[in-house]
Amino acid sequence: MTRRLSRIAAFAGVSEVTVSRVLNGSPEVAPGTRDTVLTALDVFGYPRPSASRRERAPLIGLVVPDLQNPVFPAFAEAMAGRLNKAGLIPVLCTRTADGVSEANYIEMLLGQNIGGIVFIGSSFADAGPEQGRALQERKVPMVLVNAADDNRGVAQICADDTHAAQQALTHLEALGHERIGLLLGPVGHVPSARKLAGFAAFAQARGMTQEQWRPLVAHAMFSMEGGATAVGRLLAEGVTGLVCASDALALGAVRGVRRLGLDVPRDVSVVGFDDSVFMVAADPPLTTARQPVQAMASAAVSALLGQMDGHAGDPGPVLFDTELIVRGSTAVRRRPAG
């Protein structure tokens, strides 16, 4: 019993005396503190006091497209801790190889005590029209983080993709690269479209027409294979510097460059996006735009809690600046001999 009290107290950030009071139904405990202790009981699998068992904390769905992209679980982990501290129970929802989809999770959550949903790198549109309609009709609090498609009227937290692209382009230009390419996700992917807008503005400010800069842009699936396949066409256009819409695309581009007998960064400089875990240990260490995951997670949880308290969510996207982390995958452009 003593060990259980200490575990619950440490997790909830309260004293063991407070935990004991909650377990004994004492009215001297503040409601917020009581909810935090009850959530801690749920997390560790301990039974709630009998009078509280029907008052389980609301479930918060954290919906991600997959767990292979390290930035998705990073966001989910950052939000889970904040939700727990707020007395809520996070539920990780992701597609699986055996066919479980966002729609399955949405249906499950709608049948439970759902408090809200955060879509990370996706949106309620991905869950299907029926599930999306049910969420909107029930006015379930929702927040989208780096949504893949355009969803007006829903609270959104986004990295400033336009600024990130221009920051990377400026870095490569300063290294002497004149033919700089852009490797994006699929056509219609909203964050990629914002990066494309930044690329277009950058090129136009340097006197390039659309006919001149358009061949320097390629689209691919968000995977290493997609990056490795697409990079060949860009190199055929004379590209010596490359900005990628994700770290996975960038790592794939590095692989594709090497398949062609070239070297990164001696022949081609490559910039990624996300600063996923282990990018510092890549070969070469990847220059990449770091998303402020912790700050964005805090903003997303705050927006969700505001909606749960009855406040209307901000329908416009809240943009967060990225930070370019310069490592070994970019270097001064080599001038041709002679």
Image: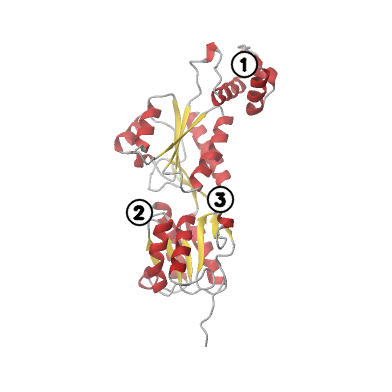
Residue at 49% x, 61% y: name it.
165
* Of the image marks 1 and 3, the number of the one nearer the N terminus: 1
The numbered mark at residue 277 is: 3
Choose mark 3 or mark 2, whichever is in front.
Answer: 3
- Gap between marks 1 and 2, in whole Å? 51 Å
For mark 1, give the secondary structure. Answer: helix
The local secondary structure at tag 3 comes to: loop
Q: CA distance from mark 1 to mark 3?
A: 39 Å
Report if residue 8 is visible in the image. yes
Q: Which mark is residue 188?
A: 2
Mark 1 highlights which residue? 22
Q: CA distance from mark 3 to mark 2?
A: 27 Å
Residue type pointed to by label 2: Gly
Q: Decide: few, some or many residues near mark 2? Use Cα within 10 Å; few <14, some 14-19, many ≥20.
A: few
Q: Earlier in the sequence, mark 1 or mark 2?
A: 1
Identity of the residue furthest to the bottom in this view: 338
Tell us which disc is closer to us: 1 or 2.
1
Q: Which disc, if any, is residue 304?
A: none
Task: Mark 3 or mark 2: name the one nearer the start of the chain.
Answer: 2
Return the residue nearer the eye: 192 or 235: 235
Q: Residue at x 58, y 44 (%)?
A: 294
Numbered disc 2: secondary structure: loop
